[in-house]
Image (cartoon, rainbow, N blue to C red):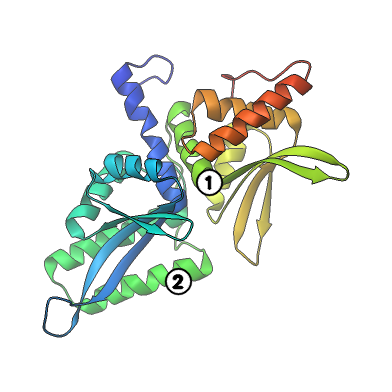
Amino acid sequence: MSGDNVTSADNQQVTLYYFTGFLTGEGSISLIKATNKKGGSGFYYTPDLTISNADLNLLKEVNRIIAENLGVISPIKGGYNLSIRGKEKVKIALTFLRKFRPIAGNLIREKLTILTNGISILEKKADRSEIEKLRKRLREIKDTAKASRNFSQLKLNRKKIGYFLAGIVDAEGSMGWRKSGDRLQPYFCVLMREEAIINLFLKYFGFGQKYYRPAEKLFHFETGKKENVLRLANFFLKNCPVRLNKNISRLENLQRILNDYMPKPAKAGKI
């Protein structure tokens, strides 16, 4: 399928990579050990995929697209949780993620593999010690931010990658204005533990810098160059749009001011 000549149905399929990117940035994957509340003693294991955000409408859309509206949304401090819990519900989400796979990211791919293996073990009613091994590995990934292997980037067309990156931006991006001496300077950055995804931003756009915060185990994609920030604003408003309202507002603000400031504004569509 060509990224330049697609039907409306094909284009709708392409845009779904946004939700994969958003889940990659905002999702939390667990194999929960819970007390049996239905009487008796003991405990049980259940797979869980949780996505947190302050935008309720966006979470409702994520629930519809990824989990066929079977997830449960509940309020938390400063926002909402979408919980997709239980074997059958998580299997629906995994079906979506097998069709629209994370384009890059060693941590997310290993965690999804662990989740898939966990469901298989639970369905076979295998030894619980196998589930505990998977739970231990999930904790190690959280603590060390290191995957056990490197996964190659998927070779997809630029439009699919662009929508995947738009989802990442809504999950992990920040943009706006900050003080530089006595002036305000525009900036655009993405912070996450997935170095492969930060590298994907650099490769895809061909500009920006990468930084690393060892204490938080966070990698940065960042640019403060006016023309580059404007190109990113144009791209994530027009080419592969973000969906988070606060990011739309911030990008529109950057776009409006930078277009007024720069004599020859950067054009969307050639990134």
Residue drawn at x 68%, y 34% as measured from the top left: 207
Amino acid beneath label 1: Ile
**Mark 2 — residue?**
140
Q: How many marks?
A: 2
Q: Residue furthest bottom?
A: 41
Using residue 154 as the reference point, say whether residue 12 is left or right of it.
left
**Mark 1 — residue?**
197
The answer to which quarter of the image holds residue 131 is bottom left
Image: 262 above or below 179? above
Image: 163 above or below 93? above
The answer to which quarter of the image holds residue 257 is top right
Closer to the camera, 185 or 192? 185
Q: Residues within 10 Å of mark 2 (few under 14, many from 20)?
A: few
Closer to the camera, 88 or 75? 75
The answer to which quarter of the image holds residue 103 is top left
Closer to the camera, 28 or 142? 28
Amino acid beneath label 2: Glu
Could you say whether the residue bearing mark 1 is in a helix, strand or loop?
helix
Closer to the camera, 70 or 188? 70
Q: Position of residue 108 (x, y in %)?
A: 42, 54
Using residue 240 as the reference point, say whether residue 250 is left or right of it.
right
Q: Position of residue 196 (x, y in %)?
A: 53, 48
Using residue 169 as the reference point, say whether residue 254 is left or right of it.
right
Q: Residue furthest right?
A: 182
Residue 150 appears in the figure = no
